[in-house]
Image (spheres, rainbow, N blue to C red):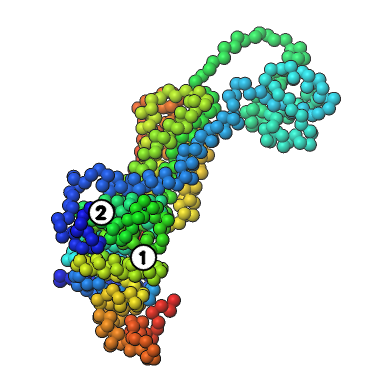
Amino acid sequence: MSDPNVVSGFSRTSLDPPVVSGVSRTPFTGRPLVQLTLARMREFIREPEAVFWTFGFPIVVSLALALAFPSRADRPVAVGLYPGAATESLRSTLKGSHGITIRDVRPDDERRALREGEVNIVVVPTTPPTYRFDPAREESRLARAVVDDALKRAAGRPEPWTAQEQPQEVAGSRYIDWFIPGLIGMGIMSNGMWGIGFGIVQARMRKLLKRMVASPMRRSEYLLAQLFARMVFLPVEVLLPLIFAVVAFGMPVNGGAVTITIVALIGALSFGAIGLLLASRARTIEAISGLMNLLMLPMWIVSGIFFSSANFPAAVQPFIHALPLTALIDALRAVILDGATLAGVRSELLVLTIWGVVPFFTSLKLFSWR
Amino acid sequence: MTGNAVSCEQLRKSYGDVVAVADLTLSVERGECFGLLGPNGAGKTTTIEILEGLLTPDAGEVEVLGLRWADDGPALRQRLGIQLQETQLADKLTVEETLRLFRSFYTRGRTIEELLKIVELESKRTSRVGRLSGGQKQRLSLACALAGDPDLLFLDEPTTGLDPQSRRQLWTLLEQFRSRGGTILMTTHYMDEAEYLCDRVAVVDQGRIIAHGAPKELIARLGQPKVTTHHGTLEDVFMALTGRHLRDE
């Protein structure tokens, strides 16, 4: 403290010309919007759990999925055989065939093994053999075809001709390549909604919101700062799993970093606005969690994170494509895997923009500062 | 109205069937410390929040520093310091970061250095708010209220839950604010606090002012204890007026 006039705190130093600073002369870091954004960012990075869920979790998930679903080309089908002499000839025939793994299955354990996917088919030693498999499962149908072919060939089936096979390595066609953009989209959704919704509800519970509006702070700046603080970490959040996938799995990235970032940014703003809307009235963590899950759960299922949304019936496709997560993931896949331009994903961006603008303005109307 | 720091007339506020404030009229002169005194649920907080522009009354007129909330809200906020009951500042921010945040809302005001010195938190500058003691948190909250160098301070139960030493320390800070010409409007349910700090008090019960005046005058008029084992206090005044104890919670 260099000012000799300030001895006991209140000796009227403010009779001296007060440090008046018009908005134009306020240094950048002295602006409310900057301070509010900084405050939110600090709160985030000082919460180790939040940092893990945002940055570490996607990498853990992609690693786990890469281990569970290795590239499908060299993945053999699992054929279950009963132990004992009855299956001996089947066993020796199938053992010599390419792309088949044999596992012993006791008859009383057969259903469980099929259900868990330990085996894709069980071959029962009748004459001719019996196939037990689930035709609803793709792997089971594949296993049936492979086994059938191997057994018939061994039985002396004549081959009318042998096709020339030309294996093609189609970039981005592996499951992990397809999955990574979905994972990034899921992260943008949950971080946007939790990050913004939780922070606001917590501030409301602590009566901090009320304290803020008792000061001359502008309300719109507070809300904008919540969104801005989200944006700051977004590039890391998107690029980290992407770089990880490129390094660890050799995933191809065909889109430009700028295009990818813009799509992610629009997505993050949409989900931030939705988070804001859900948090505009909620008074407890339980209430906001319930609302978030209610909204996110259906999208986890239908929006194509883990499996393609094309699996759902045609009648519900328009609804699925109107969802923000579907739009975001479709757009991310298009720009990352196919190298699409922004114009190429404009209908997805339009859906996202609507999901951003409508909730934002609705929440401005509904928002409770008390 | 007048040159008063705060005046309000015929304030009324209900929540459903519950009347929180019933035709309440009061005025606070510039430079004085005025206390709203009463038990929990008397309507003190509702009253002060209406005066702070955080609640809209169902009926009545409010003028603060000669301005009205509806017309001059933003300008008025620049000149007020407000401390709410039960505000918890962000735990993860440091003392200095919290002050910088609040300071940024005011176009003029005190420097961070001055604020830290006033509330004697210089040594806690880089501590997280979550690690402060109750008294330190309350002083930080006061510093946030002082960030814009206000003419008028609103304090809602500023020392509730503090130990005696921290209360004393806060009282000293408030006296210093007064001594340089600042006006204070505060609520409290501590009699000794009102007697020590306030020039005038209004005793509030069930949303109405049932007595007002200087603490000494009220005690002299109404507060003669029935059993003369102690000096008259404002507690006795409240007993005489309502037949109840102030804090029969």
Q: Is residue B31 visible?
A: yes
* Image: A198 above or below B137: above
Residue A232: horizontal and vertical position, in percent?
36, 39
Tell me, yes or no, whether the two marked residues, 1 and 2, touch with CB atoms within 8 Å: no
| Badge nearest the viewer, 1 or 2 | 2
Spatial CA distance of label 1 from label 2 is 31 Å
Q: Secondary structure at mark 1?
A: loop
**How packed is label 2: few (under 14 Cα within 10 Å), some, or many (20 or more)?**
few
Residue A56: horizontal and vertical position, in percent?
49, 38
Question: Callout 2, which amino acid?
Answer: Met
Q: Is residue B51 visible?
A: no
Give the residue displayed 39% in from the left and 38% down from the top.
A233
Name, please, the residue furthest toward the bottom.
B227
Quarter of the image that includes the C terminus of chain B: bottom left
* Image: A271 above or below A3: above
Q: Are marks 1 and 2 in one subunit?
A: no
Question: Callout 1, which amino acid?
Answer: Gln
Q: Secondary structure at mark 2?
A: loop
Q: Chain of mark 2?
A: A
Residue A348 appears left or right of A23: right
Numbered circle sitting on residue A1: 2
**Which of B5 and B174 lies nearest the eye of the viewer?**
B174
Give the residue displayed 73% in from the left and 36% down from the top.
A111
**Which of A360 and B200 lies nearest the eye of the viewer?**
B200
Residue A124: horizontal and vertical position, in percent?
78, 27
Quarter of the image that includes the N terminus of chain B: bottom left
* Picture quadrant where residue B148 is located: bottom left
Give the residue displayed 42% in from the left and 56% down from the top.
B131
Residue A245 appears left or right of B88: right
Residue position marked by numbered label 1 in the rendering: B85
Give the residue displayed 38% in from the left and 25% down from the top.
A256
* Picture quadrant where residue A110 is located: top right
